[in-house]
Amino acid sequence: MGNIFPRWLNLLPVQALIGLGGIGTLAIAVIWYSFTPKYTRVGYQPQQPIPFDHALHVGQNGMDCRYCHSHVENSSHSNIPNAQVCWNCHGPGKVKSDSPKLEPLRQAMDPNYEKYTGQPIQWVQIHETPDYAYFNHSAHVNRGVSCVECHGKVNEMEVVSHEKPLSMSFCLDCHRNVESHLRPLDQITNLDWSAHGMDEKDREAFYAYVADKAGKPVAEVKAGHEGKEWSQEAMGAYLKDLWKVNPPQDCAACHR
Amino acid sequence: MPTGTTDQGVHPSEAPGVAREPLVLNNRSFSWITERICGIVENRQPLGWWFLFIPSAILAGCLIFTLVYLVSTGVGIWGMNHPVAWGWDIVNFVFWIGIGHAGTLISAILFLTRQKWRTSVNRASEAMTLFAVMCAGIFPGFHVGRFWMVWFLAPVPNSNAIWQNFKSPLLWDVFAVSTYFTVSVIFWYIGLIPDLATLRDRARTKFRKLAYGFFALGWRGGNRQWQHYEMAYLLLAALSTPLVLSVHSVVSFDFATSVVPGWHTTIFPPYFVAGAIFGGFAMVLTLMLPCRLIYGLQDLITMKHIDNMAKIILLTGTIVGYAYIMELFISYYSANKYETDAFHLRILSGPYTWAYYCMFFCNVIAPQVFWFEKARKNLWIVFIIANFVNAGMWFERFVIIPTSVSVDFLPGQWGLYSPTWVEKLMFAGSFGLFMSLFLIFLRFLPVIAIAEVKGVLPQADPHYHDWKKLREGRRSK
């Protein structure tokens, strides 16, 4: 049997190498990006039974996060409010009580409503920590980590979406570099706060707070800082030192 | 090769008492070698092949079944628990990795040291190496519990911000074994190219021609090709040589760098390497003795080859025996309570003492019969001793791995280990996979390196001109 390979096949190894190299690079690029929470989670924006508008309630009306998510400071779990909390304002004869958008609320709360079921509103969970990762809300918000660090600027969202990846490296980036993320405790739920944006009044409040914590006179705490603009890093480093924040980085911190 | 003549005017290779035993018997010709070796691939397989292949394939199927069962259920179906977390799976891993070492020793070290007898056994032992490493890789891969997470072992930037612990010998192990496998595959394949071209040129069907032609990479056997080929082969041999020593040393670090009495031993790296070569040669003999009979390769794999391998087994087995005794001596000499207790339990009153004596008999005492030439020339004895060594090397890993952790520092941490049927079936299944792969190799690829064997024939090195000139010079005097 003679030669059965045609001449053009001589180029095949080169073509195959280039082709496989291209496919390999593409596959790596696709996996690198799209197999991560940056791709799989960020942007998740499910439709909720009631189109609750955070931008309206928090951004315009100035409600605090903790009015509804009331356990966040005391519990590892930050609760979704029960229907009673909504009912406080949207009950009969109160704000927009007969809006058709609030029908699931009336079903849950109003015994006089013909479609009354008494069942809770079926809110759709957006941010979910996997079962194998332990996360404690109270540990974070009581040590200067604001809601905004993980949930983004919810006060500007008409419909809440998953803004941060919440991947393991997202957690570790903060645990390894905590200075960039700490703020005074009275600013935890102020999602628009920034260290640069503090005016003289804010700074006075901050020094008073620090003095109270440290049990020292305000003047002593203020000494050397008068009129100083704080950067996030300086503030974070200061608070880290003050609170002795030492975020764990071992596996068992979260994978218990 | 020395040239010239003896006083009688006889070519040195023919002189009685001076001549070495020829590497190919019965003065076989080039074409006989090609026909005989290619014939294995081109003709129907003998009945013996099917008798071995069918049960092997069934066992390999059992391995797949147990792996599916393991992944779908979890590692709880294995008998391991606190305190013995390394059971038969790691025993089998070290066992198979060890077997691989003879292939590299034969192909690389014997090549660099110009041991020409390697040519008729190197192809099969390299194949054996690859299949043994494949079997080995299965066990730690599934031992991690979630097989699909094995990629965590690779240092790839990822969204979990996990980075490997480069201080851990378990990670070195991953690199050592994967390097070993890669280099072995490349070395084996480079060696195959001229023979694949031979099979391509002899092919009678279009499919065979295409398949062998594809893998022969357009080999034509020109001078320039041979020149590049031999340089590539030499470089790869040099690259593989350190691996013979490094891979099993790194495997031994998995144990030696820990603090467990019975593992924490500085003698481990050389002891493991000697044991690996020992076990590997035993497996080569186990495979090649039936193979040479079934396919009629006695002229190529001669008694000389078997004799050499038996001597290597005797040497390495004795090194291993020295290591066993030295371990005992050091534990006594250390005067360390935990160390002495561990070895006391190992050799006198422990629950696994029987395994220690199985190991000692199979690995140290049994091979001593190879001191006698008669034993080395009796194929039954060689085959039986080789299988003693196979079993003994498995027992060695069993004695080291689970028994050391079953009793360590605190009585509260003591506990016995016994395997479940799943582990037993997996071990049997790994033999099935190994044998199936080896038999498929026999079926489709030349079991002996045709081109290399031809190179060690006397015809390939004739000294024709020198010899004639010298004889004529003598006559004219």
Image: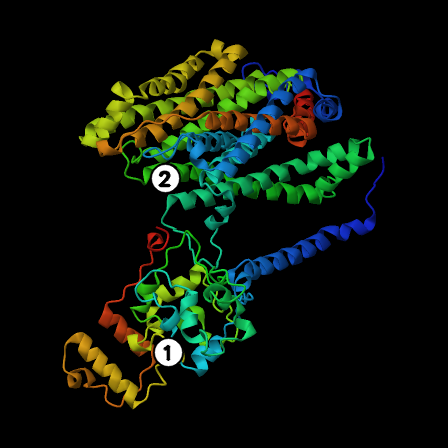
- The three-letter code of the residue at mark 2 reads Phe
Is residue B423 at all visible to an observer of this figure? Answer: yes
The quadrant holding residue B162 is bottom left
What's the coloring here? rainbow
- Tell me: residue B363, above or below residue A113: above
Is residue B2 at all visible to an observer of this figure? Answer: no
Name which residue lies at 37% across and 81% down. Answer: A194
The chain identifier of the residue carrying mark 2 reads B
Name which residue lies at 39% across and 32% down. Answer: B80
Q: Is residue A77 left or right of residue B312?
A: left
Q: Secondary structure at mark 2?
A: helix
Residue carrying label 1: A190
- The three-letter code of the residue at mark 1 reads Asn
Q: Is residue B215 left or right of residue B130?
A: right
The chain identifier of the residue carrying mark 1 reads A
Badge 2, how many Cα within 10 Å: few under 14, some, many 20+? many
Quarter of the C terminus of chain B within the rendering? top right
Q: Secondary structure at mark 1?
A: loop
Quarter of the N terminus of chain B within the rendering? top right
Residue carrying label 2: B253
Name which residue lies at 69% across and 43% down. Answer: B225
In-front residue for pair B91/A171: A171
Q: Is residue B390 left or right of residue B234?
A: left
**x then y, percent, for residue B382:** 50, 14
Circle number at residue B239: none
